[in-house]
Amino acid sequence: MQQKIYNLLRDFVAVESISCTRTEREASVFIRDYFAKFPYFQGHPEHFGIYDIPDDPYDRTIPYAFLKGNSANTVVIMGHFDVVGIEDYGEAKPLAFDLDNLEAKLKTMDLPPEARADMDSGEWLWARGAEDMKAGLVVDMVLMEDYAKMAEEGTLPGCIFFMGVPDEESYSAGMRAGVKLLSDFKKKYGLKLNVMLDPEPCAVLEDGTQILSVGSVGKTMPVVMVQALIIAPLQEGALHPSYVIGVLTITMVWCLHFWITSGRRWWYAGILFTLSYIFFFGWQTYWGFLTLDGKKWGTRG
Ligand SMILES: [Zn+2]
């Protein structure tokens, strides 16, 4: 099974599915074609396929595979197949998606001590997307083979819904559209969605402690930004006392933080700077949001 997982991962990594490019679509096709070989899906073609994300600028899609078991209890397996860019590979860039050969090339290059120690340990695979997170998806895809056999034989106790999503590294277009796909299946088959498994890699501290992430606050930050920078001043006016007090408080906190950490005398000049930025130069932000679609946006254009 280990070799099977490795081979599938090597082929999957070779699909250069960088976020916000048309290559993300090819990764969907890869997953769909993998499931198409299962006898279960040949017998149930309506249980797997590719779901088009409506109005997506890169025509991205969500590959899915549904195994119908003997009860409504359902495990959802979900993970992203897009990866970040490869600029940081330097001269090894042409091999960034080559699981078999990247490691040998990186070995000859200057590596940070931490990365060198990982490489010497021989416990890691090297390629863009290998860890984050195609390996997780591939493990589950291979496991699906056995579960599909059980579903065919009528011995699978509950249902499994597998879903690969694009665009996780940027705006989560895949996950947002995936909710609709999942709820369609839920309604159609009367599923009880008990648990969702996301085989993402996890961070490990120096003492070996593994970190479990329980939320995705980063994804909601734009909401906070829009609320604070656009909605509040538009509704109440930029000179509304609560808004000004809020801005001043945040500014004070940051300036004090700067003072404590750097010990510089001119820390309070930051208050003046922040206020002038918000009330005199802040219009750049609004212009930025309004012209987000253009190639050049904000005052940088
Ligand atoms: Zn990830």
Image: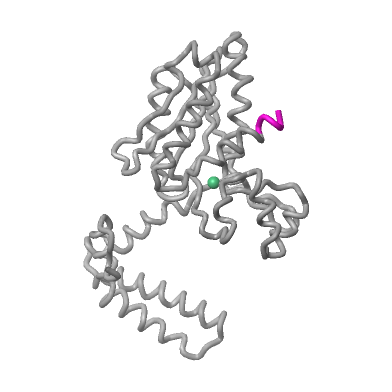
In the picture, measured across the screen, residue 54 lies left or right of residue 178, that is left
| Residue at the right extreme of this rendering | 121
Relative to 270, residue 202 above or below: above
Q: Please, which colouring scheme is shown?
A: one colour
Quadrant housing the N terminus: top right
Residue 245: x and y, percent?
34, 73
Q: Is residue 4 magenta?
A: yes
Q: Is residue 179 magenta?
A: no
In the picture, measured across the screen, residue 222 lies left or right of residue 285, that is right
Quadrant housing the C terminus: bottom left
Prevailing SS of the magenta stretch: helix
Q: Residue at x 43, y 77 (%)?
A: 252
- Residue in the foreground of this view, choosing between 88 and 73: 88
Q: Residue at x 40, y 48 (%)?
A: 20
Q: Magenta residues?
A: 1-5
Residue 126: x and y, percent?
65, 49
| Residue at the top extreme of this rendering | 153
- Residue in the foreground of this view, choosing between 287 and 277: 287
Residue 239: in sight, yes or no?
yes
Q: Residue at x 37, y 36 (%)?
A: 177
Residue 242: x and y, percent?
30, 69
